[in-house]
Image (cartoon, grey):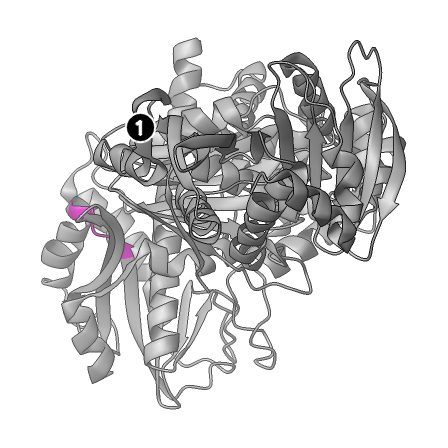
Amino acid sequence: MADENNFKLAHFSEEGKFFKSLDSMKKLPNVPFRVAVFMYDKRYEIISIFTEFQNNSNFINKFTLLEEDNEKKLYICNTEKKQDESELYFIVYKDKRISILLSNQSKEDWKNSLDFFKAFYPFLVRIFLRSFQILKILGYVEAESGLDLIAKSYVAKRYFGSPRSEVCYEKISYKTAFDQALTNNLWIDSIWVGLENKEKQLGAVRLNRRGIFSYSGISFYQFYEKFLVKVIDFFLKSYLDILEDKSRSLIKLEPKPIKIVLSDDVFVQKESFDKLIEKIKDKLKNWGYSVLAGSGILGQIMLHDYETGSSFDLYVTSSREMYIVPQTQVTEISFNNLLAFILDNFEGEIQNAS
Amino acid sequence: MQVEKEEFVRKRKAEFNNYESLLKALIVLKKYLEENLNARYYFGGKLKKTGGSDQTPDIIIELNDTQGIIGEAKKSLRGLIQGESKATYLKNYVEGDLIKQLRKYDSAFDNFKVKEHDLVLLAPQVDSEALGIIKFDFLENNNNQFSRNFAILVYSIELQANTKRILIRHDYGKLSNENLFDKLRRGISYYEGQITKELSKYKVYEENEDATPLEYIMVILWDSIFNEIINSSDKEQIAERYRKKENKFQVNLSKLMDHLKRMYTLPTISIDGVNNNHRQQFKINSVRNAMEIFCHIGLANVINKNNGDILYEITLKILPEKDELTYFLNKIYDLIDQKKYSHDQSSSEKLDKYFVKN
């Protein structure tokens, strides 16, 4: 996998050529390569949005097109006050409404970069994965590459609880880590995995449910091919059907509810519903809500996102069932944001309910 | 003062809860009748009678060509007030109000095509004192109140095995349609999850004039309708919010009415009997009152009034509190309080008075 010759050969392929400049990005000491994956509003050309909506943050002041193929465009981002040799790249898919941010920046600069994109929220939002999807992605990588994927550490969450970090002192496979979490009623939020071939460590990757990743010891092209393509595929396959074309309007009156079946009986205790309201208040910035019915355990809320203008109804109808009904002006970005919030706090299966 | 305010907000929310429970019962009835008995169900509308006055019952059901149901739906039945004798209650409330209203439906109507119909009263099961007196003190002692079959149906929201369920069942009397009568004696029940689509589409019914809580209309307007009217998710609108932290726009009361009716109300029977999907639930008064409150709390202005229509300018911006319903209720309380109305009335009466005096 990390074979130097193979890696160079890859640059003769169309894909490889596209990624050549990324692969030559310099590895800075003690800094992994970092990646974030976004979904953007397909109605608009995202690069022109950055110029048009230039706000307080000038952290990135220019996007220059470097490469283009049928599928995607590669930009280099010019950041202000650059103090090291770090670079920042932005890949935009033409048809997939997905974009990728990639860098060798320090932790602090990377945070500034992420904040820059966060400020364009109504137009783009980070993708969101579920725990089982990360497990599946790792499973495919293992099967394809024949490498051993060793869990180095993970962060797990529980309902209404704060996240728990676990460092794996013993050498365990990623599968064991997922099993461990499950046994303790937790689900994996992010995992750091070593890539080993016959006891020899080749590299490491970190996968996070909130669309943030890092890798070291392998090239971007390898990370892209082995991991990112699957991440994007999973996201699009499992969510497009849920997110797309759900808004109500005078010409589309029929509501299209989605149902979330939780993995556990979550809403059983007296304050479970109130805790959900508290989370909404706390985590959904610039949203408003109205509690229409609430027993402490179950209930019903109207929600609305001031930034996109989208409105939703949210019902908790049983100890393990929630329904979201998109109302008016619902954008995929806003809906994704709401779903990510729900799934960040409640692990479950989503399906179209109508 | 603060205690009174909290009490006002709490009471309004409790009243709203009753409103929402009846809505669920109506939706369950509609869904069952339409999906299982192929019946047609309307919430309200005008029934015409040659030589008599028009009636606006809450429930109008066409089961088939020959059988129908007309009746009243109540989100609550009041019990005895302190100091009130049972005799006064029977005379004033049961006979003078409930039964009197139902008697008005005890005749044929020109635009109701069904040959014969039964009468029903749909009420919350929890109001057992009122139901007990109606059944055992009134109906048992006063036979033949109506010239057709009459039944009391009761509804309740149950929590069964951690799942919310809406139940409607027969409580008293008889219905002509054997199928439906049999089903109601066993109970019609749906899980709330089965009706979320309908709940999101039919948010409003008007049991009688001004029955829809104003704060609810305000929330629907603020959350959904205003945004829909300006296409809030479009780039131009987002750009305006970026620059000015708000969207300002003008809209007519008639346009708001049209959006509310088409997006959020239960179908009513039409006056001419032609267009059965005609929707008339929102009364213009309720929406005007809701808009008036928006004006009072600085989120809207009246630009002009023309031929009964009103042009408003609305400022859509982030409210100081995330809990919008509570925010609006607190504001409404302040408005009432500034006018110094007495606080011994129920919160709905207080609001009514507020609008009468304004």
Between A298 and B102, the one nearer to me in the picture: A298
**Residue B83 sits in quarter:** top left
Residue B13 lies left or right of residue A103; in this view the side is: left
Image point (57%, 36%), residue name:
A211
Is B180 magenta? The answer is no
**Residue B312 sits in quarter:** top right
Q: What is the quadrant of the C terminus of chain B in the image?
A: top right
Residue A233 lies left or right of residue B73; in this view the side is: right
Between A31 and A134, the one nearer to me in the picture: A31
Q: Secondary structure at mark 1?
A: strand
Query: Is residue A242 in view?
Result: yes
Q: Return the x and y of residue A212 as percentages of the image width and height.
A: 57, 32
Q: Return the x and y of residue B232 as percentages of the image width and height.
A: 74, 43
Q: Residues within 10 Å of mark 1 (few under 14, many from 20)?
A: few
Between B317 and B330, the one nearer to me in the picture: B317
Image point (77%, 32%), residue name:
A89
Above or below: residue A294 compared with residue B204: above
**Residue B147 sits in quarter:** bottom left
Find disc 1 in the rendering and name its residue.
A171
Query: Is residue B101 in view?
Result: no
Image point (73%, 39%), residue name:
A123
Three-letter amino acid code at disc 1?
Answer: Lys
Q: Chain of mark 1?
A: A
Q: What is the quadrant of the N terminus of chain B in the image?
A: top left
- Residue at the farthest front position: A5
Count every numbered label the image shows and give the total: 1
Image point (33%, 54%), residue name:
B192
Q: Return the x and y of residue B141 as percentages of the image width and height.
A: 10, 62
The segment highlighted magenta reads B123-128
Q: Return the x and y of residue B233 as percentages of the image width and height.
A: 73, 44
